[in-house]
Image (cartoon, rainbow, N blue to C red):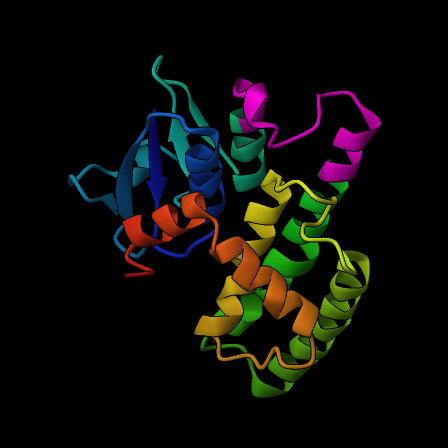
Amino acid sequence: MKLYYAPGACSLSPHIALREAGLDFDLEQVDLAAKKTRSGADYRAINPLGYVPALQLDDGTVMTEASVIAQYVADATPGAKLAPPAGSRERYGLQTWLNFIATEIHKGIGPLWKPTTPDAYKETVKQTLAARFDYLSEQLGDKPYLTGDRFTIADGYLFTVLNWTNFLKLDMAKWPKLTAYMARVAARPAVQAALKAEGLAK
């Protein structure tokens, strides 16, 4: 398997899942501006959408979308218990979190990356995100992870997008439960390994 990624992008989520699952895989960095891989290949020939992640399986099949790849990894390694069994009520609960993270946090934070976004609209985005962070903090409560005591692929995804607040210099002091959660996830050996491989940690 080969994971195509860009450092710190949403591809970090399936990268974490692959390491938590203990799977063997290769990494290839993508220049998202040039749409070229580190080896010089045309990335659009791999993923016509031009964004990461993409996971190329050993048979040549290419999978895209961070939460879908993470679920594939979880289902391929049930012993790692990164997701409840497919079809179970607990799995639907996990999928609810994955969808919330994708639509409300991942896409919600997107305009803050764009230099063309008007400052007034950025303030609106930050207000919306604050409400989502309030909800996350309330739902997390005293649990170590989103769904309870066990780390799941939803935690890998949430950590990835919450980590962007560091790059964007967003003040998270209002949400101590979230900052403690981020530190807890970051301390996991597989997460540290992924961050180091992407050049995001020493």
Residue at image point 28% right, 61% down? 202
Horizontal and vertical percent position of residue 119? 57, 86
Work out whether 179 lies above or below 69: below
From where the camera sits, is residue 11 visible?
no
Which residue is most to the bottom? 120
**Which of 74 and 60 lies nearest the eye of the viewer?**
74
**Which of 25 and 60 lies nearest the eye of the viewer?**
25
Query: Which contiguous range is marked in magenta?
Result: 74-94
Horizontal and vertical percent position of residue 37? 23, 42
199 vs 156, left or right, is left
Residue 159 found in image quarter: bottom right
Residue at image point 40% right, 30% down? 55
143 vs 80, left or right, is right
Horizontal and vertical percent position of residue 116? 48, 77
From where the camera sits, is residue 29 visible?
yes
Horizontal and vertical percent position of residue 26? 28, 31
Residue 49 belongs to the span the image colors magenta: no
Work out whether 68 lies above or below 146: above
Which residue is most to the top? 59
Residue at image point 81% right, 64% down? 138
What quarter of the picture does the N terminus occupy?
top left
Residue 83 belongs to the span the image colors magenta: yes
